[in-house]
Amino acid sequence: MSETYPQHQPPHPAVPPREDEPSFAAVPARAHWRYKPRRAFWRSRAVRAVAVAVLLALCGLVILAIVRDQTGTRGFLVGLGLAVLPVPLLMTAFRWLDRVEPGPWRNLLFAFAWGAFAAALVAIIANSFATRWIATATADPSSADTLGATVIAPVVEESAKAAAILLIFLFRRRDFTGVVDGVVFAGFTATGFAFTENILYLGSAFGEDQEIGTSGINSVTAATFFVRVVMSPFAHPLFTVLTGIGFGLAALGARHRRVRRVLLPLLGLTLAMAMHAVWNASGSLLGPWGFYAVYGAFMVPVFGLLTWLAIWSRQRELRTISGELPAYAAAGWLSPAEPLALSSMRSRSMARDYAGRTLGPAAARAVGEYEAFATSLAFLRHRARRGAMDPDFTAREQELLHHLWQRKEAAGPALTYAAQATGQVWTPPPHRNYGAGYNPYRG
């Protein structure tokens, strides 16, 4: 009996049954290890990667020269040494969140570099220009500084950081699959931006201490370090994560829902600007006590809420794996134990450790790659079922199955062992007809 679906819910994509020797006809012969569709020269990854690297390098040279000019060489070095301290912690936290389907490091490094160099350069130039223009127009430098901090800076800085997320969303769409990806890309971008901004603030504070002769815990440098690095290293990531969530929700939607795909990122960006403005206003308008009040009553609860949302989204990704991969297990591509083993971070780690102990490091790497490709396969199918099928769905599905096939010998026993060791048993849901479908793999 064929399965029926409500009209508002698209049916499950058909799963090709497994053959003893699948031909993977949709995967070009030139791409034995990775499917690469043909592109014009100017659209090739190498050309675009070089162009982006050169652009970011130029931005980095300019922004660092500006910061060094404003802080002095000694201030720049002190600010650099202090500003780098929270960076590994933040990057590790966001990378941990991305463990279910870890994206390529090149995307994360691009996001960090964009925030640290391009976004910071745009922000320092635009903020300075706008503040000077307001001061000239109003003849009130004090009000111009306040208006610049509470209105201009949030709009400029959040827009500049959002550009990195937009670029990844447009040009690395395959790696942008949901809310967790949006949070991670936003976190890396904002961490880079905060890094450069902290160099400027800490370096300037050190220069001020040198002028007035203060040092130790009573110095301006110590106070700035406490507020920006100890109390609120998450401030910029917290703002920009709202933009990332907007893009992540847009990535989950069907491609034909263009209004939603535009409005959700704009809504996230608007909320990021608003929260940034509240944070800046708490210091410039409300004074020290107002700052601490906003920090405790607003920033900390929002940080907790967004942290919970990010972790919940990660758990939702694991549930997606356990819900989508049984289709491939029923068709014979995976063993019956693999879907639940792949939907548990503990089982994944145990499978890699088992393969490493029994077959060596190369097998452990193969199991890790197998887990990543299986996760991508689950998300690909999930998007298609939600009406957001990729244009190259068939070729992409074959590519992923091709990679799984190549690593099956090492990964299958390891994942089965992990599933048995953790007491996981899989039985196919009775209401799904997993075996039906076309078979494009026949020779």
Image (cartoon, grey):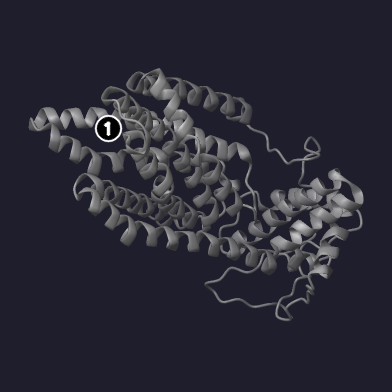
The quadrant of the rendering that contains the N terminus is: bottom right
Q: Is residue 116 left or right of residue 150?
A: right
Q: Where is residue 281 in the image (x, y as percent from the top left)?
A: 23, 48
Rendered image quadrant of residue 215: top left
Report crowding for label 1: few under 14, some 14 to 19, many 20 or more residues within 10 A (C-alpha). Answer: many
Q: Position of residue 262 (x, y in %)?
A: 40, 51
Q: Which residue lies furthest to the left in this view?
A: 139
Front residue of 330 and 313: 313
Residue sitting at x 23%, y 43%: 151
Residue 131 lies, with reference to residue 394, above or below; the image says above
Residue 396 lies, with reference to residue 384, above or below; the image says above
Residue 69 appears anywhere in the view? yes
Residue under label 1, please give it. Answer: 127
Residue 443 appears anywhere in the view? no
Q: Position of residue 297 (x, y in %)?
A: 31, 62
Front residue of 383 and 154: 154
Residue sitting at x 25%, y 46%: 283
Residue sitting at x 88%, y 60%: 413
Residue type pointed to by label 1: Asn
Residue sitting at x 78%, y 77%: 427
Rendered image quadrant of residue 326: bottom right
Front residue of 225 and 413: 225
Rendered image quadrant of residue 190: top left
Front residue of 383 and 244: 244
Q: Position of residue 67 (x, y in %)?
A: 37, 24
